[in-house]
Image (spheres, rainbow, N blue to C red):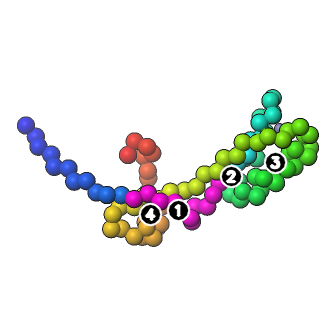
Amino acid sequence: MTRAVYRFVDHTIRHEPAGGIVAELFCMTYGCDKSSGAQGNAEDAQDWALRHTGLNPGHELYRREFSDHARVTRAGQEPAALISRSSHDCGGAAR
Ligand SMILES: [Zn+2]
């Protein structure tokens, strides 16, 4: 019989401001599949919607998606120390 000892380490997840905010607007008019595309500046996405409505009267309803970045840090580790580890090969959700 093999015995294993597991050590659990606390981690914290928080918003990472350096990653910025990504915004995308989707036209919800039936039959229209246009979107602003992912924009690093929310104003650019909104400007696209204003232009889209101007060119397509009646296309007035949009779904807005905003996303941010989050950083997970190990208890006792400074978040700034991890920024330089961006080359880390993350295996995705399985890890
Ligand atoms: Zn549209």
The residue shown at (72%, 42%) is 63
The residue carrying mark 4 is 85
For residue 49, side relative to residue 72 (left or right): right
Do the numbered discs 1 and 4 sit on residues whose CB atoms are within 8 Å?
no
Q: Picture coordinates of residue 24 (x, y %)? A: 70, 48
Look at label 3 and name its amino acid: Ala
Within 8 Å of ligand 1, the CB of disc 1? no
Segment colored magenta: 12-23
The residue mark sitting in front, 1 or 4, is 1
The residue carrying mark 2 is 23
Look at label 4 and name its amino acid: Arg
For residue 37, side relative to residue 83 (left or right): right
The residue carrying mark 3 is 49
Query: Dividing the picture into quarters, in which one does residue 19 lie?
Result: bottom right
Look at label 2 and name its amino acid: Ala
**Disc nearer the start of the sequence (4/2):** 2
Check the image and report above or below for 59 versus 77: above
Quote the CA–CA distance across marks 3 and 2: 12 Å
The residue carrying mark 1 is 16
Is residue 35 among what the camera can see?
A: no
**Disc nearer the start of the sequence (4/3):** 3
Quote the CA–CA distance across marks 4 and 3: 37 Å
Look at label 1 and name its amino acid: Glu
Residue situated in front as seen by the camera: 12 or 85 = 12
**Disc nearer the start of the sequence (2/1):** 1
Residue situated in front as seen by the camera: 28 or 18 = 28
Quote the CA–CA distance across marks 1 and 3: 27 Å
As helix, strand or loop, the secondary structure at mark 3 comes to helix
For residue 7, side relative to residue 62 (left or right): left
**Disc nearer the start of the sequence (3/2):** 2
